[in-house]
C-alpha cells in the first residue's frame, strides 16, 4: 500500500501519527513497544514530528535498523542523528539501545531506501548480502561492507525486519519512486517480497 503526500512535511506528520498509533496500541496491550528507525537525511522531519507526539515514551525502546561503523561524534552517525532529532522533548524518555541488543519482535520498523535500491544496509554487492536477506537466517544482525557504502555497517537482518508487527517504508522524490517501481533485481525487492503488506509513505 502506497500513501502519497504533497510535501515532505505532510508526509512526516502523517508518518509520525501512524507510528505513534502503533506504538500506543502495543503499549496498551503489553505495556511496552519497540521502534526501529533508519538513518540518513530523509527521516529528520519525521523524527522531529514524532518526538513531540504525546505517548508513554518511557515504555518505548528505540533501536536502529542499521548503523555506520563511525564514532558517535561523526556527522554520519545514525546514533547521533536519532539522539539529536528523535530523542528530544517527550521522546527523550524513551530507552535507546544498541543495535546488537537482543529484542523481542519489533512493534514498528521504519525503513528508508537509497537510489541504488538498498534498504537497511542491504547494499548491492555487500559481502554479507545473501546472508542478511536469507529468510531462514537466524542472525539478528550482521556486519556489511559494500562498494556503495562509505564505511562498514551493521544491520538488522531481513527475518528480524519481516517479523515487525508494522513495517513502513519512507521515501521522498520522483527518482526514488522510480527505483521502487523497478526494483526487481535490487535488495529492496527482497523486503517487498517478504512483506507485501509493507506501508509505503512517499512525497515529491
Image: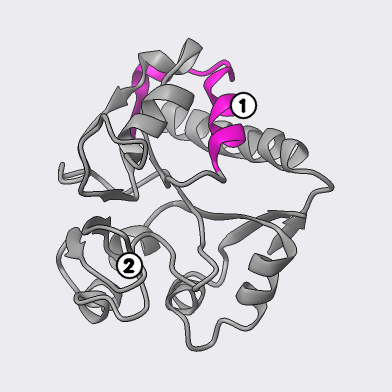
Secondary structure, mark 2, is: helix
Residue at the image position 20 percent from the left and 75 percent from the top:
128
Q: Quadrant of residue 182?
A: bottom right
Q: Which residue is mark 1?
A: 49
Of callouts 1 and 2, which one flags the residue occurring earlier in the amino acid sequence? 1
Residue at the image position 21 percent from the left and 59 percent from the top:
152
Does 179 sit above or below residue 112?
Answer: below
Residue 158 disc label: 2
Q: Is residue 135 visible?
A: no
Does 181 sit above or below residue 47?
Answer: below
Residue at the image position 61 percent from the left and 58 percent from the top:
199
Q: Is residue 128 magenta?
A: no
Where does residue 197 sit, x and y in percent of width and height? Answer: 57, 66
Q: Nearer the viewer, mark 1 or mark 2?
A: 1
Q: CA distance from mark 1 to mark 2?
A: 27 Å
Does 182 sit above or below residue 7?
Answer: below
From which residue to which does the magenta span run? 43-62
Q: Is residue 177 left or right of residue 80?
A: right
Q: Is residue 22 left or right of residue 35?
A: right
Q: Decide: few, some or many residues near mark 2? Use Cα within 10 Å; few <14, some 14-19, many ≥20.
A: many
**Labels 1 and 2 touching (C-beta < 8 A):** no
Where does residue 101 sit, x and y in percent of width and height? Answer: 15, 41
Residue at the image position 55 percent from the left and 72 percent from the top:
196
Q: Is residue 55 left or right of residue 75?
A: right
Where does residue 52 sit, x and y in percent of width and height? Answer: 58, 17
Amino acid at each position: 500500500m502506497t500513501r502519497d503526500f504533497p510535501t515532505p512535511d505532510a508526509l512526516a506528520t502523517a508518518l509520525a501519527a501512524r507510528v505513534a498509533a502503533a506504538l500506543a496500541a502495543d503499549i496498551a496491550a503489553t505495556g511496552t513497544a519497540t521502534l526501529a528507525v533508519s538513518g540518513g537525511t530523509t527521516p529528520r522531519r519525521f523524527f522531529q514530528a514524532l518526538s513531540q507526539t504525546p505517548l508513554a515514551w518511557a515504555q518505548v525502546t528505540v533501536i536502529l535498523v542499521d548503523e555506520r561503523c563511525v564514532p558517535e561524534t561523526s556527522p554520519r552517525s545514525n546514533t547521533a542523528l536519532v539522539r539529536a532529532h528523535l530523542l528530544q522533548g517527550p521522546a527523550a524518555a524513551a530507552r535507546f539501545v544498541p543495535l546488537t541488543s537482543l529484542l523481542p519482535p519489533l512493534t514498528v520498523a521504519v525503513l528508508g531506501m537509497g537510489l541504488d535500491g538498498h534498504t537497511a544496509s542491504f547494499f548491492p554487492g555487500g559481502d554479507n548480502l545473501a546472508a542478511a536477506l536469507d529468510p531462514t537466517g537466524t542472525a539478528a544482525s550482521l556486519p556489511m561492507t559494500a562498494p556503495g557504502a562509505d564505511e562498514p555497517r551493521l544491520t538488522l537482518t531481513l527475518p528480524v525486519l519481516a517479523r515487525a508487527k508494522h513495517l513502513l517504508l519512507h521515501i521522498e522524490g520522483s527518482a526514488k519512486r522510480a527505483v521502487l517501481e523497478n526494483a526487481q533485481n535490487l535488495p529492496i525487492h527482497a523486503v517487498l517480497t517478504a512483506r507485501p503488506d509493507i506501508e509505503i509513505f512517499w512525497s515529491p
